[in-house]
Image (cartoon, rainbow, N blue to C red):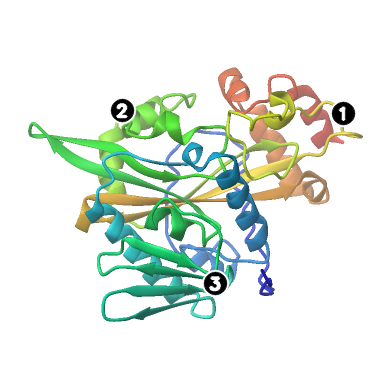
Amino acid sequence: MTMKEITRAPAQYFPFMSGVFEVAAGLRQFGTDFGNKELDQKLIQIDSEFYKYRENKTKCREENIHKYCCSHRFGTEKQSHLVAFLSAKVCEEYPEYFRLREEAQSKILNCALTQEELHFDTHWNLLESSKTSLKYLNAFDALCSQIQEDVALLTLEQVEGVQKNYLSAVHLCAAGHWSPEDKIGKDFFAVHTPVPHIEKINERAQQFADMMVHKGPFVRFVWGFSTDTRLNHHPVAPQGIDSKTWHGRSFQDPKRDQLFVRVERQVTWGLPEINSGLFTIRVSYLKGEEILKDPEKKQKLLESIQSMSPHSKKYKGLETSYETLCKYLES
């Protein structure tokens, strides 16, 4: 594949600047200016690292795409609406990379970055993906493979007169130490229960689920630590790879180990027409050595990790790295 040059630099976010680590909704109105110009206004962010993300998604497919792409009661109506929405969005935000044309019995999305053409029928079911050897599971899988973001869908449903919710679709190739297979079909409460200090949010789990569908769009950030910039940190290592090495987050020797802050930009976008909420995740990394050069960022990061509870340190993988990390940031 001949790579199309992308000169746009990735967006950068510094969600630890409060100096306090807390588990909170942290919702901001979508479009809030975080200093990244037009990228803060876009649902899908395409930048100079596009091909790194594409390669990662291709590797996940080669390993076992069912490990990364899962669905539950994700019927034709939901998938068609979601695929139509995302197709329109990428064409609106990046007309230089995506072009949609309609023929008598089909819709064709031309994807310049991957040089693929996705052919859909009039109901947005995938007919074929031409100019590629990749075999997609469905239209959802095919479209998610054309962008850098990971994508999930939360659906509301009336069960015996009571409003319920469940995770109906996930395409997650930049996993942050959680498994789509473990979360699919579960409700908001169950999905988030493993997170320490999530209790106050989970007390209003159904309210948050309703808000994802009927309010917003919103943007929020979560962050943690890593000793590599590998996008995929699925809790189960691929066959033949040492699980300890795969897991990462062991910062023992600053002369040997690299440090990165892993940031997730998470956007919720309501799709009330299908009683669902779209959830996108975009992973990026900040270099520890660059943070050290900025006294304010270094101090706020240090204060944030020092404010972590023992449970949060364990959840973020800092049990054995905490002391070394603090000394590194104090240097």
Estimate the x, y position of residue 20 in percent, counting from the top left. Answer: 59, 35
Q: Which residue is mark 1?
A: 253
Q: Earlier in the sequence, mark 3 or mark 2?
A: 3
Q: Secondary structure at mark 3?
A: helix
Residue sitting nearer the eye, 55 or 253: 55
Calculate the distance from the C-alpha at mark 3 to the C-alpha at mark 1.
39 Å
Calculate the distance from the C-alpha at mark 3 to the C-alpha at mark 2.
36 Å
Residue 113 seen in the current view: yes
Calculate the distance from the C-alpha at mark 2 to the C-alpha at mark 1.
41 Å
- Circle number at residue 179: none
The residue at 50%/36% (across/down) is 67
- The quadrant the N terminus occupies is bottom right
Residue at the right extreme of this rendering: 255
Q: Residues within 10 Å of mark 2 (few under 14, many from 20)?
A: few
Q: Which residue is mark 3?
A: 38
- The quadrant the C terminus occupies is top right
Q: Earlier in the sequence, mark 3 or mark 1?
A: 3
- Circle number at residue 203: 2
**Type of amino acid under label 1:** Asp
Estimate the x, y position of residue 52 in percent, counting from the top left. Answer: 67, 56
The reply to whether callout 3 and callout 1 are in contact (CB within 8 Å) is: no
Q: Secondary structure at mark 2?
A: loop
Q: Name the side, left or right, on which 122 lies relative to 252.
A: left
Q: Is residue 28 above or below residue 24?
A: below
Residue 214 seen in the current view: no
Estimate the x, y position of residue 45 in percent, counting from the top left. Answer: 54, 63
The residue at 39%/55% (across/down) is 140
**Type of amino acid under label 3:** Glu
